[in-house]
Image (cartoon, rainbow, N blue to C red):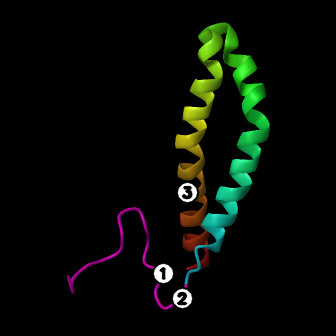
Amino acid sequence: MEDSGALPGRSEIGSKIFSPSVDRFSLIVLSIFGIILAPEIASGLEPLLGEKSFSAVACGLIIAIPLIASSIGKLYVRIRA
């Protein structure tokens, strides 16, 4: 356990202290945008998916929003380092 390195996909940030506030802030902002835009996206997909379009959009946003927020946090750490 002493030889453990950085987590996969995370860069070494040296002696800088990283706060997960950027991840949290981007997750909250993206979640709000997702809630606002979900009906619009679902109405756009309705000709293709029918009545299941809102369920598909909800599942897609549940997967996509945390991935995008994590990517923003990683980018912030790399820029700051």
Q: Is residue 4 left or right of residue 64?
A: left
Residue at the extreme bottom: 15
What residue type is disc 3 on?
Answer: Ser
Q: Is residue 22 left or right of residue 40?
A: left
Q: In this figure, what is the number of numbered marks?
A: 3
First in sequence, mark 3 or 1: give its number. 1
Residue 72 drawn above or below residue 43: below
Q: Nearer the viewer, residue 16 or 50?
A: 50
Instruction: Report the residue marked by disc 2.
Output: 16
**In the picture, residue 40 is in which quadrant?**
top right
What residue type is disc 1 on?
Answer: Ile
Q: Position of residue 34 (x, y in %)?
A: 71, 41
Classed neighbour count for the residue bearing mark 1: other residues with Cα under 10 Å, few (<14), some (14–19), many (≥20)? some
Instruction: Report the residue marked by disc 1.
Output: 13
As for residue 12 lying within the magenta part, the answer is yes
Q: CA distance from mark 1 to mark 2?
A: 6 Å
Q: Main secondary structure of the magenta part?
A: loop
What residue type is disc 2 on?
Answer: Lys
Going 35% across and 64% down the picture, which residue do you hit? 8
Q: Nearer the viewer, residue 48 or 39?
A: 39
Highlighted range, magenta:
1-17
Going 61% across and 65% down the picture, which residue do you hit? 23
Residue 59 drawn above or below residue 20: above
Q: Position of residue 53 (x, y in %)?
A: 63, 19
Q: Are dots 1 and 2 in contact, CB under 8 Å?
A: yes
As for residue 60 lying within the magenta part, the answer is no
Going 65% across and 24% down the picture, which residue do you hit? 54
First in sequence, mark 3 or 2: give its number. 2
Residue 61 drawn above or below residue 16: above
Instruction: Report the residue marked by disc 3.
Output: 71
Q: Are dots 3 and 1 in contact, CB under 8 Å?
A: no
